[in-house]
Amino acid sequence: MQTNIKPSKKPMMTTKMLVILALLAALSFVLEKFLGIDTMYFKLHFGYLPVAAAGMLFGMIPALMVGVIVDILGNLQYFNIFFVLLAALEAAAFAFFLHSRKEGKKEMIMQAVLCQLFISIVVQMGLNTLLLWLLYHSFNPIRFLITVLVFPIKVFSLYLLLKYRKAFETYIA
């Protein structure tokens, strides 16, 4: 029996792409662990931007890889698979909302707002809060206020990422 399976002309992941993804993961780790503000009630860092860049530039699977690797490495001391799944959902949201190209300023702002709105409401305020309650019986309403306060900062940073997309794409081409 003969099969007519033709090999694909373009590999799914090139060495250059894997190196760029590794650099994005390392950058995310450094931005989150060493350059962020992390207190008991407040956590502000830009570690999400390299994960968002992976989703914007490369799509779903590479963004999942970067998001999961960074979450596992960043939380080795208190590893929990459920929080890794939340990090994967956040990375998938970045890829889902940011991978499609929008040209106008209003479209890019809307893209950034929808992406961060989904992450803020569903992932951070919803599932993350539920998971903290189920696992640790911990509920902190200040988390909601902080999520709302950092929302514009995150939207603006995602917009800037989208605005300079062409520069990133010329670098990875």
Image: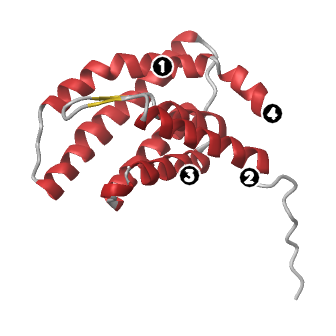
Side (left or right) of 79 relative to 28: left
Q: Secondary structure at mark 3?
A: helix
Q: Which residue carries the number 4 mark?
A: 173
Q: Which residue carries the number 2 mark?
A: 13
Tell which residue pokes out farthest to the bottom in this image.
Answer: 1
The answer to whether the residue labelled 2 contacts the one labelled 1, judged by CB atoms less than 8 Å apart, is no
Q: Secondary structure at mark 1?
A: helix
Label located before the other in sequence (4 or 1): 1
113, 170: nearer the viewer = 170
Residue 153 versus residue 62 in the image, above or below: above
Tag 3: residue type?
A: Met
Quadrant in the picture for the N terminus: bottom right
Q: Which residue carries the number 1 mark?
A: 157
Label located before the other in sequence (3 or 1): 3
11, 49: nearer the viewer = 49
* Residue 71 place in picture, x, y as percent: 43, 49
Q: Residues within 10 Å of mark 3 (few under 14, many from 20)?
A: some
Classify residue 143 by image quadrant. top left
Q: Residue 62 bears which disc, if any?
A: none
Tag 4: residue type?
A: Ala
Q: Which residue carries the number 3 mark?
A: 65
Label 2 to label 3: alpha-carbon separation: 12 Å
Label 2 to label 1: alpha-carbon separation: 27 Å
Label 3 to label 4: alpha-carbon separation: 20 Å
Side (left or right) of 95 relative to 80: right
Side (left or right) of 144 relative to 98: left
* Residue 24 place in picture, x, y as percent: 60, 38
Q: Secondary structure at mark 2?
A: loop
Label located before the other in sequence (2 or 4): 2
Label located before the other in sequence (2 or 1): 2
